[in-house]
Amino acid sequence: MTIQTTALATVLALGVALPAIAQDCPVKVGVLHSLSGTMAISETTLKDTMLTLIEKQNAAGGLLGCEIEAVVVDPASDWPLFAEKARELLTVHEVDVIFGNWTSVSRKSVLPVIEELNGLLFYPVQYEGEESSKNVFYTGAAPNQQAIPATDYFLEELGIEKFALLGTDYVYPRTTNNILEAYLGSKGISEDDIFVNYTPFGHSDWSKIVADVVALGADGKRVGVISTINGDANIGFYKELAAAGVSADDIPVVAFSVGEEELSGLDTSNLVGHLAAWNYFQSADTEANAEWVAAWKARMGEDRVTNDPMEAHYIGFNMWVNAATAAGSVDVDAVRAAMYGQEFPNLTGGTAVMLPNHHLAKPVLIGEITEDGQFDIISQTGEVPGDAWTDYLPDSAVLMSDWKDLECGMYNTETKTCVQTLSNY
């Protein structure tokens, strides 16, 4: 730790106002999103979001007397390439922070690089939890902010008795479904009434899988699909549902990776009534959201939509700006210390809060797909604190993350010890 960083940490701990520190200009923000490959359907919009946010901040005077410069790279939906591009951003371009990734496998690829070089990553997408790094702020939903509430909705509101857990074959769907299988078991759902299937990225032939899902209801029990299918594979899945004549009344689907952007490429007339669980929808009726949507469309075009991971970047970027301003520096350690307790209004009403476990407290929304490719919000909670470690897997239930006071991402509440401080699990 440098003398400057030590001094910053001391005054932050004492709550003393910081004097202005000479800041190298420009401030550089790395943008690490796939602009090609199977995930470009989702991630290109997040690149555009970051450029919009940076442009707006520069128009308001920049940060610490500097203009903010976006450094955009394309990891091309290639998971090992994410690590190479993260290293390039930190060592060649010397960025001060990175906003990026979508899939958990890409985040896992980047994680060792970020930790080795003490970079800072803001990760904006719902994920499986079971991770806590001092170098990552997780602004998307943890399972208790998306998967668990969606499952409760299926059980309590729709009376679902049999579950098809369909996912893309990588860490996020597999871990999320492990959690959901345990959770469903705790709710009295038999293993025989849970069907799990994984397909590769870009999978296109859904006829047999959809037929298998339909067959689950042969015994008269009501079937629901919980989808962790990611990327452009969703296009084929929903098209096959429509081709098979499966409506939301027959077999409802709740998706965790399908938002307005993904629906914009689909004929949604046959998808009306299917569901998605997020922390934001474009249809949220608030003044702040109306302003955001209007500004987005004015910049990008009337046909461009907003979505949940965009709001996560919106919240994360503004929190980072405010933390850097409070710290008087974009130094990673100083910004991290200033991030705890940061608050920023979310776009659906209420206020997002950054917790010591590097997760946000924010609301959970469930929406029904409408014919125009938007979502009718049918359920909304208050602010739910994100949980890095699930309560439904035995090894995780005893763990907590607290980087502010305990300086530990895996604190065992039974042994009162820090299991380890790096997220190489």
Image: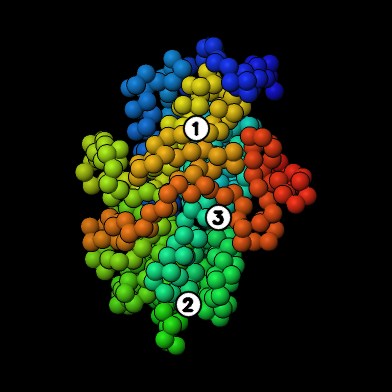
Mark 1, Cα crowd under 10 Å, few <14 / some 14-19 / many 20+, is: some
What amino acid is labelled 2 in the image? Lys
Residue visible at 64% across and 40% down in the picture? 402
Separation (CA) of disc 2 from disc 1:
41 Å
SS at mark 1? loop
Task: Pick whichever, 72 or 279, lies toward us.
Answer: 279
Say above or below: 268 vs 331: below
> Within 10 angstroms of label 2, few (less than 14), some, or many (20 or more) residues?
many
Q: Amino acid at mark 3?
A: Glu
Which amino acid is tagged 1? Gln
Q: Quadrant of residue 157?
A: bottom left
Q: Is label 3 in contact with label 1 (beta carbons under 8 Å)?
A: no
Calculate the distance from the C-alpha at mark 2 to the C-alpha at mark 3. 22 Å
Q: Which residue is mark 3?
A: 128
Point out the tag, 2 or 1, that comes first from the N-terminus: 2
The quadrant the N terminus occupies is top right
Image x and y of residue 274, in percent: 34, 66
Above or below, 346 relative to 157: above
Q: Identify the residue at horizontal 47%, vertical 56% (top origin).
A: 146
Label 3 environment density (alpha carbons within 10 Å; few <14, some 14–19, many ≥20): many
Viewer-nearest of labels 3 and 1? 1
* x 28%, y 57%: residue: 376
Q: Residue at x 38, y 54 (%)?
A: 380
Q: Is residue 232 visible?
A: no
Q: Which residue is mark 2?
A: 162
Q: Which residue is mark 1?
A: 342
Which tag, 2 or 3, sits closer to the chain's start? 3
Helix, strand or loop for disc 3: loop
Kind of element beneath mark 2 = strand
Residue toward you, 35 or 355:
355
Q: CA distance from mark 3 to mark 1?
A: 24 Å
